[in-house]
Amino acid sequence: LTDEHIQFLTEYFDENLQGYILEAVEELTKKIDNLDMKKTKFNEFMINGCNLSFKKVTFWPETRQKEDTIKERLKVLL
């Protein structure tokens, strides 16, 4: 990918701070014909080429967030 692609992706994520990689791929492929890239390669390019970082969403069970559970864990730590 070229500097134009990097610029496009940087602007895309500046405007969509919580954007998804797949959405960015779709937008980039709409803009550029003949672009065929797998998600893993695209992700690799964005990390290494664009110097962007990504966070993976982790969902915790509801019981883990209950006040009693938090207090019990705190007791163990202290």
Image (spheres, helix red, strand yellow):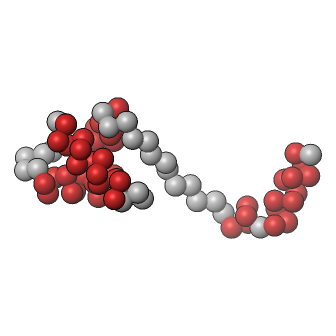
Residue 57 x %, y %: 52, 55
- In this rendered view, identify the residue nearer to me: 37 or 8: 8
Residue 18 x %, y %: 42, 59
Residue at image point 28% right, 41% down: 42
As drawn, 39 above or below 51: below
Rendering quarter of residue 65: bottom right
Instruction: For residue 40, say whether it is visible.
Output: no
As drawn, 41 above or below 71: above
Rendering quarter of residue 64: bottom right
Q: How many numbered markers are drawn?
A: 0
Q: On the picture, is 47 further left or further right than 36?
A: right
- Quarter of the image with the N terminus in it: top left
Instruction: For residue 30, say whether it is visible.
Output: yes
Residue 60 x %, y %: 64, 59
Q: On the picture, is 41 further left or further right than 54?
A: left
- In this rendered view, identify the residue nearer to me: 45 or 14: 14
Q: On the picture, is 64 further left or further right than 74?
A: left
Residue 70 x %, y %: 81, 59
Q: On the picture, is 53 further left or further right than 48?
A: right
Q: Residue furthest left?
A: 33
Rendering quarter of residue 77: top right
Residue at image point 22% right, 56% down: 26
